[in-house]
Amino acid sequence: ILDCSGQRRIAAVEQVIIAEDEQRLPCFSDYGLSPSEHIVALSQLEDQLDENSTQDYLSAAIKTVVFLVGLVSESNPYAFERVMQSCLRLQALRRHKIYVLTENLKVAANGLEKLYRETRDAGVIYIKFTRTRPDITQVADGRVTLEFTDEVTGDQLILPADLTIVDEKLMPTDYTIDLVRIFE
């Protein structure tokens, strides 16, 4: 039964879709990392890029930025769109060395292939893992060092990151869970 400006309307429906905001849970522990000024969640980076203090946040000391996305659990095109938009925004501020480490590059949604090409043209380097995973170490100053085998060349590589961005799991909020229970 719906109340539309004082008028009651009865509607019979087969499904109810609850479209509430999601809760974003950073995957720090999945990568064996703890948050620090050098290790942040994707949402935190996006918030910083939206604020006026971005220049202070991204000091000249930050030269290498690494995004960890979809290495532990399967990612989605929405996450990759957010990562690629953040890469372009970072490059617009200052030329950084930006790396995106992933298992599957999710660019199947509308416009993402084009966005992917834009990021590559802007200098973003994508490193895809199919058989191995990088060894991720958080060092004493809170930064991250990544060691891995390049699957194309077979070379052992070490990548020190000044800023590491971790992906997030999208989960329903407690309110959404309550609504699901109410609607059964």
Image: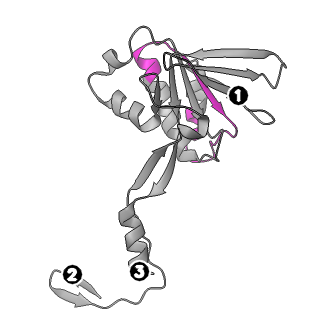
Asked if residue 15 is positioned above or below residue 58 in the image, the reply reads: below
Q: Indicate the amino acid at tag 3.
A: Phe
Q: Tell me the SS state at disc 2.
A: strand
Quadrant holding the N terminus: bottom left
Write down the residue under mark 2: 4
Q: Disc 1 and disc 2: Cα gap in Å?
A: 56 Å
Query: Is 33 part of what is drawn in magenta?
Result: no
The type of residue carrying mark 1 is Pro
Q: For residue 129, which quarter of the picture?
A: top right
What separation in Å lies between label 3 and label 1 (alpha carbons)? Answer: 44 Å
Closest to the observer, 125 or 68: 68
Answer few, some or many: residues within 10 Å of disc 2's Cα (few below 14, many 20 plus, some between 14 and 19): few
For discs 3 and 1, the disc positioned in front in the rendered view: 1
Find residue 157 and report its horizontal and vertical position in percent.
Answer: 73, 15
Look at label 2 and name its amino acid: Cys
Q: Is residue 105 left or right of residue 33?
A: right
Q: Write down the region rendered in magenta.
A: 90-115
The tag earlier along the polypeptide, 3 or 1, is 1
User: Residue 65, position in %: x, y?
Assistant: 53, 20
Mark earlier in primary sequence (2, 3): 2
Colour scheme: one colour
Judge by depth and name the residue closer to the eye, 155 or 147.
147
Circle 3: element type: helix
Callout 1: 10 Å neighbours few (<14), some, many (20+)?
Answer: some
Q: Which residue is mark 3?
A: 183
Quadrant containing the C terminus in the rendered view: bottom left
Q: Which residue is mark 1?
A: 134
Q: Nearer the viewer, mark 1 or mark 2?
A: 1
Is the C-beta separation of discs 2 and 3 under 8 Å?
no
Choose the circle earlier in sequence order: 1 or 2. 2
